[in-house]
């Protein structure tokens, strides 16, 4: 054992305490602030990642997170995307554009910082921070509509759809606390309730569509992990029936307001819809498909890819050029072709692979997070961009960081 001179012990103790405070700040910024102050949350989280990268360079123990499957798969996804960008780049800016997804490439630094908390980092703690974020989102959405008279809740702090996406994810991250503290299940169940309130007042149909699968799969996963199999299956079946009945009643009765128009999304399968917003998304998808076939291996690059996709739209398909194509699969297909689609698959698989690889104390927690996170991002990404929008990308990186850090806790102990 290396003895530290007495005159150096004081500064080292202060540094250790500072790192612990920064780790708590990273949890607050990553799990509580996104719904109420996404800009501040993004900046703070990126700074914490930078500090963590320094830790990776100077300390050996935090480097254990580099062996995490989430880190490996996201870096492989980044490598595939970079190869595609090299093939299509006409300037250095086309290569530098990969940094739009920087939180995914550098989240190991964030995880290294979280490891400074040691045994203080627990599923119940993670759930508590996320519940606070989801609760803040619900309060903001309700106040925007009921007090300030906004048409859609969340508009005071963010785009209403992005706001609902973030709050929905935070609400379901909150459920992870049940894996450690099942006696506090009612408290942690507030997460999805808060998320639904936020979605309701925001009038965001994409997150509303994603809520059902996340509730069924996330709740079912927790039930299977924590309850006897037969009881878990009965509970899952009953929950699915109740959710289906409530959803049908709300939509068919007109009580759901703007969310009631969600039924028209099904007409996308026929190629036409009376809903202007859904019709616009349909045109984007059709344009993206044509752009993909025009360059199926390497795509067209990140810069101005939406304009490229629009140039492949038939003359009768007019839509506004947004910063994305309202669909993650379409975005990756146009940007980087088949390599982009492979990159997307790896990004979606990363949390699941990371959670499943954990054999330690918090295995149930990491499996739950590794299941509900990619499901939520895939479902929400069908109607709105998730990867490439900084707040959503950063939250995904934070969850990956949490899975990796929790996997380091008691990893030599049985689950």
Image: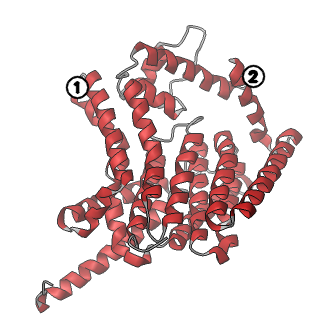
Q: Position of residue 167 (x, y in %)?
A: 59, 54
Q: Residue placed at 49% from the left, 65% from the top?
A: 363
- Residue 62 picture location, percent across and down: 28, 66
Question: Real-space Cα distance between discs 1 and 2?
Answer: 42 Å
Residue at image position (67%, 58%) is 219
Residue 91 - label: 1
Identity of the residue drawn at 21% across and 68% down: 59
The earlier-in-sequence mark between 1 and 2 is 1
At mark 1, the secondary structure is: loop
Q: Is residue 144 visible to us here? A: no
397 on left or right of 98: right
Q: Position of residue 285 (x, y in %)?
A: 56, 23
Q: How many marks?
A: 2
What residue is rendered at 74% in x and 56% in y?
A: 236
Residue 120 shows up from this direction: yes
Task: Identify the secondary structure beneath mark 2.
Answer: loop
Q: Is residue 110 above or below residue 345?
A: below
Q: Residues within 10 Å of mark 1 (few under 14, many from 20)?
A: few
Q: Which mark is residue 122?
A: none
Q: On screen, 274 above or below 124?
A: above
- Residue tagged 2: 274
Q: Quadrant of residue 183?
A: bottom right
């Amino acid at each position: 054992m290396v003895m530290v001179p007495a005159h150096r012990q004081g500064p080292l103790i202060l540094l250790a305490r500072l790192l612990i405070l920064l780790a708590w700040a990273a949890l607050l910024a990553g799990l509580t602030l996104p719904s109420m102050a996404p800009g501040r949350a993004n900046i703070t989280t990126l700074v914490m990642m930078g500090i963590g990268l320094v830790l990776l360079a100077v300390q050996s123990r935090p480097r254990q997170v580099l062996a995490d499957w989430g880190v490996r798969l996201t870096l492989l996804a980044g490598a595939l995307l970079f190869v595609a960008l090299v093939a299509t780049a006409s300037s250095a800016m086309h290569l530098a554009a990969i940094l739009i997804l920087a939180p995914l490439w550098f989240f190991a630094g964030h995880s290294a910082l979280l490891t400074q908390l040691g045994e203080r980092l627990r599923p119940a703690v993670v759930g508590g921070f996320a519940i606070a974020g989801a609760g803040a989102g619900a309060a903001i959405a309700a106040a925007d509509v009921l007090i300030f008279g906004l048409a859609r809740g969340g508009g005071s702090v963010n785009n209403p759809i992005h706001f609902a996406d973030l709050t929905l994810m935070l609400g379901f991250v909150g459920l992870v606390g049940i894996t450690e503290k099942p006696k506090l299940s009612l408290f942690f169940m507030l997460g999805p309730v808060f998320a639904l309130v936020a979605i309701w007042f925001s009038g965001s149909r994409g997150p509303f569509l994603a809520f059902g699968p996340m509730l069924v799969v996330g709740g079912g996963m927790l039930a299977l992990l924590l309850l006897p199999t037969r009881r878990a299956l009965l509970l899952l079946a009953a929950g699915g029936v109740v959710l289906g009945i409530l959803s049908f009643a709300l939509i068919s009765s007109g009580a759901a307001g703007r969310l009631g128009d969600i039924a028209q999304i099904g007409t996308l399968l026929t190629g036409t819809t009376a809903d202007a917003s859904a019709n616009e998304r349909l045109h984007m998808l059709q344009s993206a498909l044509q752009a993909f076939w025009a360059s199926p291996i390497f795509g067209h690059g990140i810069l101005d890819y939406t304009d490229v996709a629009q140039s492949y739209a038939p003359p009768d398909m007019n839509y506004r050029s947004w910063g994305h194509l309202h669909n993650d699969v379409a975005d990756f297909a146009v940007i980087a072709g088949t390599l982009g689609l492979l990159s997307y698959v790896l990004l979606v698989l990363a949390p699941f692979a990371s959670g499943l690889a954990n054999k330690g104390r918090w295995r149930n927690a990491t499996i739950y997070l590794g299941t509900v996170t990619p499901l939520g991002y895939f479902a929400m990404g069908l109607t709105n961009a998730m990867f490439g929008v900084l707040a959503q990308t950063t939250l995904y990186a934070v969850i990956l960081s949490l899975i990796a850090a929790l996997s380091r806790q008691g990893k030599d102990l049985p689950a």
